Amino acid sequence: MSRFSGYVVVVLLIAALNTSPACTELIGLYEDTDLMEILDKTNFNDKVLQGNTSYVIEFYNAFCGHCIRFSTPWKGFGIQVYGLTSKSNTSSPKQKVLYSFK
């Protein structure tokens, strides 16, 4: 390995480390305007487990490429079935916030 290629590897590694978000708790794929009901550890049991409504729940991680790509069709699905059932999203355990379509 030449001396130049060693520098390229170091630069790429530094660039990769600098592009990662600093705080995972502030990053999400969904907003309040996406017809969602926000669920968290204080209301998840009452609304989902003991409620009278059926839920479709998406578990996701905001850094997962598949989850990021799926967020757009999930929002579209929520618009199509709005009022028929409650669709919900749960973020990664580090975010401690769960989302549900209204």
Image (cartoon, grey):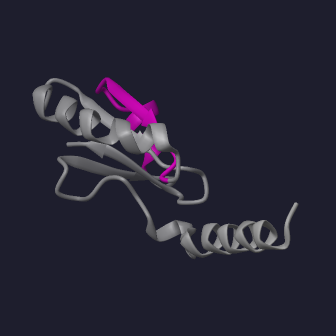
36 in relation to 17, above or below: above
Residue at 68%, 74% in the rendered image: 11
93 in relation to 57, above or below: below
**The magenta segment:** 43-62
Res 14 quadrant in image: bottom right
> What percent of the width, then of the height, locates residue 72?
26, 40
* Magenta stretch holds residue 49: yes
Residue at 35%, 27% in the rendered image: 56
Quadrant including the N terminus? bottom right
* Magenta stretch holds residue 60: yes
65 in relation to 63, above or below: above
Residue at 22%, 26% in the rendered image: 85
Res 76 quadrant in image: top left
Res 100 quadrant in image: top left
Which residue reaches farthest right? 1
> What percent of the width, then of the height, locates residue 17?
65, 71
Residue at 53%, 58% in the rendered image: 96
